[in-house]
Amino acid sequence: MVAVAAVKASFFHRPVWEVAQDLLGKVLLTRLEEGETAVRLTEVEAYAGVHDRA
């Protein structure tokens, strides 16, 4: 079993392009009554809110 550490809310309190870059390779884990799922992020996109022209 691999140790899992959740990111803190402060991880997201910075420019979106930095967060997106640092999310690459992270594993998202869900634990429900039905079981666990885990996915590794291999692609991300960053949008800077309603004023982002993307």
Image (cartoon, rainbow, N blue to C red):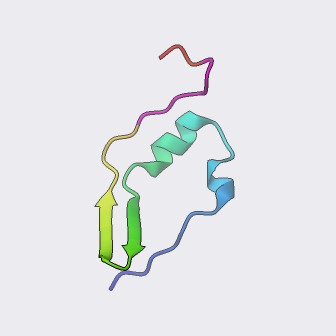
Residue at the top extreme, as displayed: 53
From this view, report whether residue 1 is shown above or below residue 52: below
Residue 17 painted magenta = no
Residue 28 placement: quadrant = bottom left
Q: In the image, what residue occupies the spot 49% across and 41% down?
A: 20
Q: Nearer the viewer, residue 53 or 3?
A: 53
From this view, report whether residue 22 is shown above or below residue 29: above
Q: Is the magenta stretch mostly helix, strand or loop?
A: loop
Q: Where is residue 32 in the image (x, y as percent from the top left)?
A: 39, 75
Residue at the front extreme, as displayed: 33
From this view, report whether residue 41 is shown above or below residue 30: above
Residue 16 placement: quadrant = top right
Q: In the image, what residue occupies the spot 57% across and 63% down?
A: 7
Q: Position of residue 12 (x, y in %)?
A: 62, 49
Residue 47 painted magenta = yes
Q: In the image, what residue occupies the spot 47% across and 42% down?
A: 21
Q: Position of residue 2 (x, y in %)?
A: 36, 81
Q: Which of 37 and 25 is in front in this view?
A: 37
Number of marks present in the image shown: 0
Give the quarter of the figure containing the N terminus.
Answer: bottom left
Specify the segment rendered in magenta. Answer: 45-51
